[in-house]
Image: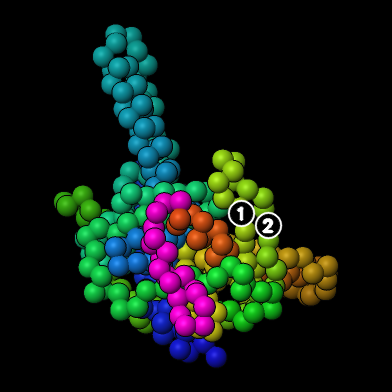
């Protein structure tokens, strides 16, 4: 059902690898997904992909404050000998890898109320992407529609930090091999009102299957491969069922849930891209689609 659509979508999505190094030296790696929107290199992803970078900026300020405080103490006669110790989880180094070596995401706009980020890949060669996405007409988004989600879950990417180069090293990533789709249906459209600045409706598509870790920022699409929504979260709906099970001789009451995916509705995606003056292909009439300037 989705074989042709998956082939189309695989052309314009890539993994984003987020690497951080903490003050205690521990290196952590996460993977998400982003959608390349047009030949100019504009792309969208989930806003929470940037959460660690925001923490990194905050932690850098805290580390500077601690350093200045310790230096001022050491220069004062009679000052306490004990230094202020930084939190070991403060982030000292941070890096994004945007699908290709040497590529950065610039001119970034993040709205965490919606959970969307829009930015421009630089440098970018349009020949890197053989097919660009078509964003569905919001009027054609209907409950019960079969949809599919694709991204980069189940990855085991382990970054390392090179002290001599003061840079992260990540292994070669077989992008095509890591792609993973899962299908479902559009169960509900969720309206969370408008953003605080009254610029955007906070609309979300809910699906009968969950989004998987690593698919955040990736597309939810229909059988034509048209973008229906962008995956951002998974919700756990209580079923009200409480079966019992025996574990090591103990009877345990279990709560059962239905795991569902949720993604930013295509109407909101299109509104945000219009606001940022990002061109995109939009689903048009039966003859094809049109480019929105």
Residue 213 in picture, x, y percent from top left: 51, 67
**Badge number at residue 106:** none
The residue where tag 1 is placed is: 202
Residues tagged 2 and 1 counted as in contact (Cβ below 8 A): yes
Residue stretch in magenta: 275-293
Residue 76 in picture, x, y percent from top left: 29, 11
Mark 2 element type: strand
Mark 1 element type: strand
**Badge number at residue 191:** 2
Q: Residues within 10 Å of mark 2 (few under 14, many from 20)?
A: few
Q: Can residue 259 be spotted in the picture?
A: no
| Left or right: 160 in relation to 87 | left
Label 2 vs 1, first from the N-terminus: 2
The structure residue drawn at horizontal position 26% and vertical position 73%, both measured from the top left corner, is: 128
The structure residue drawn at horizontal position 36% and vertical position 70%, both measured from the top left corner, is: 14
Residue 138 in picture, x, y percent from top left: 58, 68
Q: Nearer the viewer, residue 48 or 35?
A: 35
């Amino acid at each position: 059902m989705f074989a042709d659509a998956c082939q189309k979508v695989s052309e314009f999505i890539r993994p984003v690898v987020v690497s951080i190094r903490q003050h205690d030296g521990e290196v952590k790696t996460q993977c998400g997904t982003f959608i390349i929107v047009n030949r100019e290199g504009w792309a969208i992803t989930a806003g929470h992909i940037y959460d660690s970078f925001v923490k990194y900026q905050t932690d850098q300020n805290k580390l500077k404050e601690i350093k200045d405080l310790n230096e001022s103490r050491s220069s004062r006669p009679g000052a306490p000998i004990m230094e202020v110790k930084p939190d070991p989880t403060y982030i000292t180094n941070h890096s994004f890898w945007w699908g290709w070596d040497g590529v950065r995401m610039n001119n970034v706009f993040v709205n965490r109320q919606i959970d969307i980020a829009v930015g421009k890949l630089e440098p970018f060669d349009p020949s890197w992407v053989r097919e660009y996405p078509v964003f569905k007409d919001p009027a054609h988004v209907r409950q019960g529609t079969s949809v599919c989600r694709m991204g980069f879950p189940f990855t085991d990417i382990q970054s390392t930090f090179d002290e001599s180069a003061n840079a992260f090293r990540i292994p070669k990533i077989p992008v095509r091999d890591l792609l993973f789709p899962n299908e479902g249906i559009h169960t509900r459209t969720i309206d969370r009102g408008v953003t605080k600045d009254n610029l955007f409706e906070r609309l979300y598509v809910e699906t009968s299957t969950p989004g998987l870790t690593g698919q955040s920022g990736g597309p939810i699409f229909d059988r034509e491969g048209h973008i229906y929504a962008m995956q951002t979260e998974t919700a756990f709906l209580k079923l009200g069922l409480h079966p019992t099970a025996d574990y090591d001789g103990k009877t345990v009451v279990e709560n059962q849930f239905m795991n569902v995916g949720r993604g930013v509705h295509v109407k909101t995606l299109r509104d945000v891209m219009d606001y940022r003056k990002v061109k995109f292909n939009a689903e048009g009439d039966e003859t094809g689609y049109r480019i929105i300037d």
